[in-house]
Image (cartoon, coloured by chain):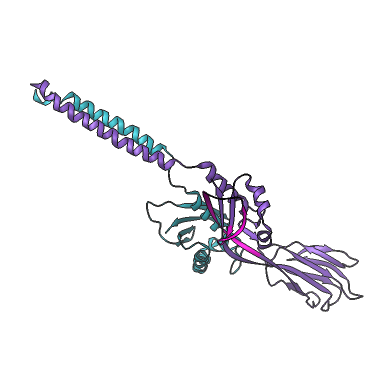
């Protein structure tokens, strides 16, 4: 008999707390995310546009198509591409460039705002991430 | 006995619900504060920056490549015509390019650009029969002037194997040739004899680019 005596108000309170947190979750998840910084997105897009403008060091159309064409092309050109990105990006930015044949740049940390841009080349998509380092 | 136990239980329950409500309000408030921006002012800066780096914009030669001449010619009235009523400043690498009005509360957008300087170069090659001339730089602007010596007829001009000029009676004069910025250009001349220096003049534009940061500030 004593087992059944859990106070009704405690049960109501539990349900009430759950309800209140459910509403809060709606606010937190429903409001627009802070991520997707317009400035960082612009940096990432611009970096793609600038690299796509560069003449290649060997054959091919541009520097970006040169690294996306083949694994050997990536091996050969990735260091030069990293140097070029370092020169073009402002000092306060870090980057990561992903191609089908490998990645260039730094590992992405958690919990920071990113700018992302995807750049199409004839041999595949290049994804560029940029964040404040 | 049971009824009296209920009073502290009710107190604890009320405390729990109140605490939960308080925490929730703080979280929701934080979420709203983070989402609150001044979208119109931000958008004015973003849109102006987008316009300036766009391929068909007032400064750009191609997407994100600004012409050095266009940047030099960009002034307050032209900036005013783009930005409307608001005050705005456009900077390139921190140096003011154009200013329109006052910018008291700036919303700034920075874009990575290349600044291109174009320089015309001239080649006056001697061309043996069947030989080709390869331009040392890639370019999309090539002009060829044909002035062959008397008795020599230039029947056709080919760019990368593709015939672009053809006249069986002989070509003479200045012609613009189609070429690509992403390919090396080789020009071949189909002539009846060797062409001495001076009978062919090839002019081509060479572009040199420098990196830069375009800062666009618009008053809120």
**Is the residue B194 above or below the residue B15 in the image?**
below
Is-magenta flag for residue B72?
no
In the rendering, at what x and y percent does residue A119 appear? 55, 54
Q: Return the residue found at the far left.
A: B1
In the rendering, at what x and y percent does residue B196 appear? 83, 79
Q: Is residue A29 left or right of residue B126?
A: left
For the residue pair B179 and A90, the one nearer the viewer reads as: A90
Residue B133 picture quarter: bottom right
> Residue shown at 60%/62% (left/top)?
B114
Residue A3 picture quarter: top left
Q: Chain letter for cyan?
A: A
> Residue shown at 50%/68% (left/top)?
A83
In the rendering, at what x and y percent does residue A94 appear? 45, 60
* Start-end of magenta stretch: B91-116
Specify the quadrant that holds the C terminus of chain A. Answer: bottom left
Q: Can you see residue A51? A: no
Chain B colour in the picture: purple
Q: Can you see residue A81? A: yes
Q: Which is the main secondary structure of the residues drawn in magenta? A: strand
Q: Is residue B59 left or right of residue A66?
A: right
For the residue pair B68 and B208, the one nearer the viewer reads as: B68
> Residue shown at 63%/45% (left/top)?
B84
């Amino acid at each position: 008999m004593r087992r059944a005596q859990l106070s009704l108000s405690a049960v109501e309170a539990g349900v009430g707390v759950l309800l209140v947190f459910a509403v809060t979750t709606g606010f937190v998840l429903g409001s627009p995310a802070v991520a997707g910084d317009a400035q960082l997105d612009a940096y990432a897009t611009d970096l793609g546009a600038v690299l796509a403008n560069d003449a290649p060091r060997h054959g091919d159309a541009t520097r970006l198509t040169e690294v996306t064409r083949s694994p050997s092309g990536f091996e050969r050109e990735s260091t030069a591409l990293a140097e070029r990105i370092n020169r073009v990006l402002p000092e306060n930015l870090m980057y990561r460039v992903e191609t089908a044949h490998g990645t260039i740049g730094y590992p992405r940390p958690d919990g920071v705002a990113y700018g992302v841009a995807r750049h199409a080349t004839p041999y595949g998509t290049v994804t560029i991430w940029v964040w404040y380092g | 006995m049971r009824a009296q136990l209920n009073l502290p239980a009710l107190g604890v329950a009320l405390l729990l619900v109140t605490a939960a409500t308080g925490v929730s309000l703080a979280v929701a408030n934080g979420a709203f504060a983070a989402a609150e921006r001044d979208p119109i002012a931000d958008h004015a800066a973003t849109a102006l920056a987008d316009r300036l780096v766009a391929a068909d914009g007032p400064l750009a030669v191609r997407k994100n490549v600004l012409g050095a001449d266009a940047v030099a010619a960009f002034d307050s009235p032209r900036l005013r015509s783009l930005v409307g009523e608001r005050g705005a400043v456009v900077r390139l690498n921190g140096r003011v390019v154009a200013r329109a009005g006052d910018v008291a509360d700036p919303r700034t957008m920075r874009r990575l650009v290349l600044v291109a300087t174009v320089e015309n170069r001239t080649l006056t090659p001697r061309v043996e029969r069947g030989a080709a001339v390869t331009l040392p730089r890639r370019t999309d602007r090539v002009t060829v002037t044909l002035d062959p010596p008397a008795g020599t007829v230039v029947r056709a001009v080919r760019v990368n194997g593709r015939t672009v000029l053809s006249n069986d009676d002989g070509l003479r004069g200045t012609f613009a040739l189609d070429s690509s910025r992403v390919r090396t250009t080789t020009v071949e001349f189909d002539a009846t004899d060797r062409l001495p220096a001076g009978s062919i003049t090839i002019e081509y534009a060479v572009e040199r680019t420098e990196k830069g940061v375009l800062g666009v500030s618009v008053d809120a």
